[in-house]
Image: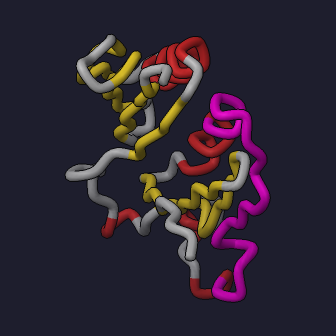
Amino acid sequence: MQLSPYLFFNGECEAAFKFYEQCLGGKIDAMMTYAESPEAEQTSPESRDRIMHAHLTVNDMALMGSDAPPSHFETPQGFSVSLQFDDVVEAERIFQALAENGTIKMPLQETFWASRFGIVVDRFGTPWMINCDRAS
């Protein structure tokens, strides 16, 4: 079994996934617009270029997402995408990249359980928790 986050956006899925690909060092394996789907004829003109499904692979993990229909989009709340690191420098780099034009909820800092831990909401509204374990 694999557990993979699926994120919904309000028309920014393509930009978000291109950013995540660059920021996280992943690869977009699939990105399909509503116009490219079998349902294209039933898609409103304003939704045709929105993303129906995107799939990003980072190492052996998957992050998926799409643009929600405009009437169904809700601002993300009640969760965070959690990234675990062994390398403080990499944790700091990713945190800073996600924080650019976003909102830092908890600065990346040393805690009693981690070399670094921080919470950020990126420019696309996705909440992230960055955790870098203490060296054993």
Seen at 62% across and 38% down, the residue is 20
Q: In the figure, residue 34 lies in which quadrant?
A: bottom right
- Against 47, residue 85 (above or below) is above
- Against 91, residue 4 (above or below) is below
Q: Is 124 on the left or on the right of 121, as rendered?
A: right
On the image, the x and y values in percent for residue 113 come to 29, 26
Seen at 39% across and 42% down, the residue is 126
Quadrant the N terminus occupies = bottom right
- Against 89, residue 24 (above or below) is below
Viewer-nearest residue: 58 or 136: 136
- Residue placed farthest to the left in the image? 78
On the image, the x and y values in percent for residue 30 come to 76, 62
On the image, the x and y values in percent for residue 90 come to 60, 19
Tally of numbered discs: 0
- Against 55, residue 34 (above or below) is below
On the image, the x and y values in percent for residue 117 come to 35, 23
- Residue placed farthest to the front in the image? 136
Q: Is 28 on the left or on the right of 119, as rendered?
A: right
The magenta-colored residue range is 20-39
Seen at 36% across and 15% down, the residue is 108
Q: In the figure, residue 119 lies in which quadrant?
A: top left
Q: Is 7 on the left or on the right of 63, as rendered?
A: left
> How is the model colour-coded?
secondary structure
Viewer-nearest residue: 28 or 35: 28
Seen at 30% across and 19% down, the residue is 104
In reply to whether residue 13 is colored magenta, the answer given is: no
Viewer-nearest residue: 109 or 47: 109
